[in-house]
Image: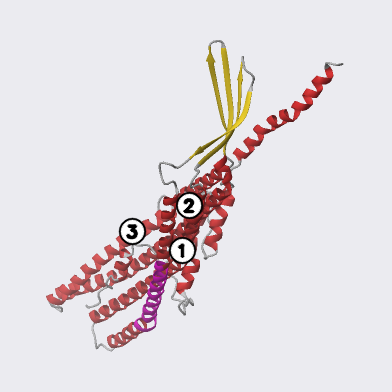
Amino acid sequence: MSETLPSRRALRRRLPRVLLLAALPPLLAACAGIAPDPTATLAPVNELTQARQGPALQRQPLAPDELARRLSEPLSADAAVQLALLNQRGLQARLAELDLSALDVADAGRLPNPGFRFSRLSRGDERELERGWSLDLARLLTLPLQRTVGRRQLAVAQQQLAAEVLAQAAEVRRAWVGAVAAEAALAYRQRVMDAADAGAELARRMQAAGNFNALDQAREQGFAAEAALALERARLQRLSTRERLVRLLGLENDRGLRLPAELPPLPDAPREPRDVEAQALAQRLDVQAARLALEQSARQLDLSRVTRWVSMMELGAVRNSSNEQPTQRGWEIALELPLFGPGPLPRAETLAARAAHHAADVAIQARSEAREAYGLYRGAYELARRHRDELLPLARRVSQEQLLRYNGMLIGVFELLADARAQVAAAAAAQDALRDLWLAQVDLDQALSAGPPPAARGAMDAARSAPAPSAAH
């Protein structure tokens, strides 16, 4: 009985240590196994895009059956944007990069892993074992600041992805407008070609009968050749714009792609935002991302000031045992002093200054781009309105008058054909003006919400300045 009681007391003394050691590995494994939720990581991105009338991004691409169902009807601009965001593999890759950023932030915010040291020393018959545990105390003390910096880094990454989503949606809308406009332009060019072929064939027959001179016949044949070249250019433009839309939609080919025959009609009134500069500064994601980067650099500067003199501090427990000496127990602390270098503070100060200048530059650019986009939009609307309300009605009136004169045998068939070609040219010019309006509206939406419109505006400007079909004949 006297031997049993001490063993029970020893068991009661050792029981808390045993339970702590038994519970420590599962606890550490649970802390190490916590991973960020992909749905929670993506939710702020969708909140940012939907707050700016943008689409929501999803992680799973479309199944073949669902893709075929969406392509079974003519694709509108909104439907094209939704399809692109669901089927574009490039955006899915960007989602994986966002998940990597979330994992990095989670790793930076975890407790520092403890370190273990073990050594075995011998001297003659003496054997000495040294064991030690250590913990990065500097990182533990600065863990709240590191977590704040990590969360801001993730917020910046989410802002950037939301801006890319809105920019991708704008590109899809531009491609859709260009593809639909190319379809309509091809139809107009075909009508011009039909009229040119009819005029050339009639001129050939009349010249063969001796009722038409060679000069007029050559003019008609020249116009037919020009119409054929314009038709071929329209076909190439249709191919280019259609393939661009196919790429943005993530489709393998354009076999199932159906588009409307014409663009939406001109709105009754233009959009009139109250203050485009203030709206751009308040809503643009690149401006907000620059502000977050500035705040992040300020937090990083604070962290560098905390660790300016002590960049590494470890606290450890030591236990040395020997077969000839009593066991040694104690603790140790290790410091790393920046004696041979300025430390992280100068770099952090430089990064903070760069972030401040960048934020100011982004704000200046945003205000200018918003003013430019709104001015171009209003100009495009005015041009499209004049085509619709002035030039097209005048072309129809002239055509009616020419038809009356032809019925009264005051003009010939060639004059009537020339007037038909002029009317088709006026309709094509109005269609181009309508295309420019919708492209300018896409640019305005992007300048007020996501960021700067694409720098590759040269192709668009060249398309807008392309000459209308010739109606001189």
- Which residue type does callout 2 highlight? Asn
Label 1 environment density (alpha carbons within 10 Å; few <14, some 14–19, many ≥20): many
- Residue topped by disc 3: 240
- Residue topped by disc 1: 287
Q: Gap in Å between the C-alphas at discs 2 and 1?
A: 29 Å
In contact (CB < 8 Å): disc 3 and disc 2:
no
Q: Residue furthest right?
A: 1
Image location (x, y in percent) of residue 395: 33, 82
Image location (x, y in percent) of residue 437: 40, 72
> Is residue 388 shown in magenta?
yes
- Circle nearer the viewer, 3 or 1: 1
Give the mark, 3 or 1, whose residue is nearer the N terminus: 3
Residue occupying image coordinates x 43% and y 41%: 339
In the figure, 450 relative to 380: above or below? above
Start-end of magenta stretch: 364-391
Q: Quadrant of the N terminus?
A: top right
Whether residue 69 can be seen here: yes
Q: Which mark is residue 87?
A: 2
Left or right of 315: which side holds 87? left
Q: Gap in Å between the C-alphas at discs 3 and 1?
A: 34 Å
Left or right of 68: which side holds 438? left
- Which residue type does callout 3 highlight? Ser
Q: Main secondary structure of the magenta part?
A: helix
Image-quadrant location for residue 392: bottom left
Whether residue 73 can be seen here: no
